[in-house]
Image: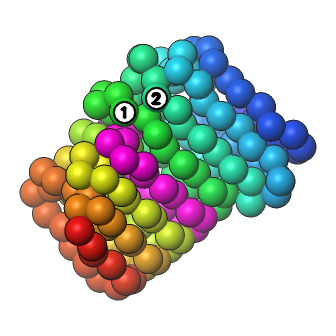
Amino acid sequence: SAPSINVLSGNHTLNIGMHLLFDTALDVNPGSSITFGANTQFPTSQSLIISGDGNIFFQPSTPPYLLTNLIFNGANTTNTNTNTQPTAFSQIIINSGKVENTLAGFFGNNAALFIMNGGEVINRGTLGSFVSAEAIINGGVLYNLDGGLAFPDAALVTINGGTIFMSN
């Protein structure tokens, strides 16, 4: 089975470079949290698979995250990362959970593909963006608020289902 990081209880901050040698599962229990701080990076091309009912915070980082894929199967994730370097190079997939991209945050900028199958995504602010190539919305709820640019440079946005709310 894939290696995993399990946050069973408490609130924790990682502020170091992490070399993921394999695709890694991150499971955060309810009432617990993990924060990836300013010095966190994933300098290897692996996938991070997020699950659980806890909270995950991506703070502004000096180095880019450099993940291959970022997959959400649960948890409440808040991104305040203003680094314009890619969070993920290949895919960001949201199957469930809540993902919030805050004012001026970049999440997966330059990712090849953004797929939303379920869950809830909140994109805020005029600079907030998720992807710069292709987006496929199959389900879930996407809130594009405060003039946010969810997919500013996408060559193709396909909407097969789900609900999208836009506001300025």
Instruction: Classify mark 2: residues with Cα within 10 Å, few (<14), some (14-19) or many (20+).
Output: some
Query: In terms of sequence position, does the residue under pointer 2 or pointer 1 come before the other?
Result: 2
Quick check: 168 left or right of 141?
A: left
Is the C terminus in the top left, top right, bottom left or bottom right quadrant?
bottom left
Nearer the observer, 59 or 53: 59
Instruction: Give the vertical position of 118 relative to 18 (above or below).
Output: below
Q: Quadrant of residue 66?
A: top left
Residue 26 rendering spot, x and y as whole percentages:
69, 43
Residue at the image position 31 percent from the left and 53 percent from the top: 125
Q: Does the magenta stretch include residue 107?
A: no
Q: Is mark 1 on a helix, strand or loop?
A: loop
Residue at the image position 38 percent from the left and 71 percent from the top: 143
Nearer the observer, 111 or 56: 56
Residue 135 rendering spot, x and y as whole percentages:
26, 62
Looking at the rendered structure, the kind of residue marked 1 is Thr
Nearer the observer, 84 or 116: 84
Q: Name the residue under label 2.
A: 60
| Extent of the magenta region | 87-106
Q: Does the magenta stretch include residue 100?
A: yes
Q: Can residue 18 be seen in this view?
A: no
Q: Name the residue under label 1.
A: 82
Residue at the image position 26 percent from the left and 58 percent from the top: 148
* Contact, mark 2 vs mark 1 (Cβ under 8 Å): yes
Nearer the observer, 38 or 40: 38
Instruction: Give the vertical position of 37 relative to 105 (above or below).
Output: above
Residue at the image position 41 percent from the left and 67 percent from the top: 116
Q: What element carries label 2?
A: loop
